[in-house]
Amino acid sequence: MLNIFLKKTTMASILSRLKDIAKYSMMYACLTHCTFEYVGDFVVCNGPSMEPTLHSKNILLTERISRRFHNPRRGDIIIAVSPTDPKQFICKRVVGIPGDRIALKSSVAPATDTSADEAVANRKLKMLKFIDEYVPRGFIWIEGDNSANSSDSRYYGPIPIGLVKSRVVCRLWPLNEMCML
């Protein structure tokens, strides 16, 4: 009789402990989800578009609170959903906010009514033409710091502010390069 009683209390004790572990695991999972969804998270940079400011394999701390109170500001480094691939995130610098005029350089072919010597010279030195682009309300203009190796708003135009997920606060890794951004 005593043996059955001990088995029941041991089993009840084990079940009680398992229930506590499950309860605390659920609370931790909910707290972690809410923190990463609404407060901030960690991001691993990948690609050369933000060099020399950020390099591949840099670990960044981002925050999501400020975007709920105000739009991104010029100079902020942001994490956003890529407008060309919704499964991918991009890390870029905000260059233009709604209402800003962006002057883009565009190379054009030389005019055809010039002499042959001038046409050859023009082909060697392409003429640069500037195109004005305005950032509409509800959009921002983003560019990578490495303009020669960055796919950004110069390629796909201004992006909706709704695609912005977070703002980069600081670089955490590598430790010798840790700094506020």
Image (cartoon, rainbow, N blue to C red):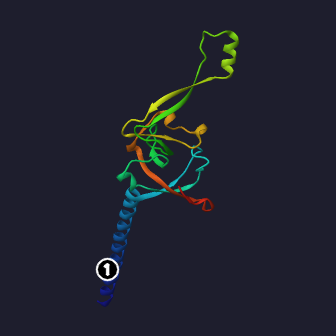
Relative to the observer, which residue lies in front, 99 or 25?
99
Q: Measured from the top left, where is residue 50 in percent x and y?
A: 57, 46
User: In this rendering, would 54 be left or right of 19?
Assistant: right
Judge whether 39 appears above or below 15 on screen.
Answer: above
Q: Residue at x 31, y 82 (%)?
A: 8
The quadrant where residue 113 appears: top right
Residue 131 percent location from the top left of the image: 50, 27
Residue 139: x, y in percent? 40, 39
Q: Which residue is mark 1?
A: 12
**Quadrant of the rendered structure where residue 109 is?**
top right
Q: Label 1: state its secondary structure.
A: helix
Q: Is residue 129 above or below residue 3?
A: above
At x 43%, y 38%, the residue is 159
148 to 173, vertically: above or below: above
Between residues 137 and 30, which one lies in front from this camera angle? 137
Residue at x 30% of width, y 86% of height: 5
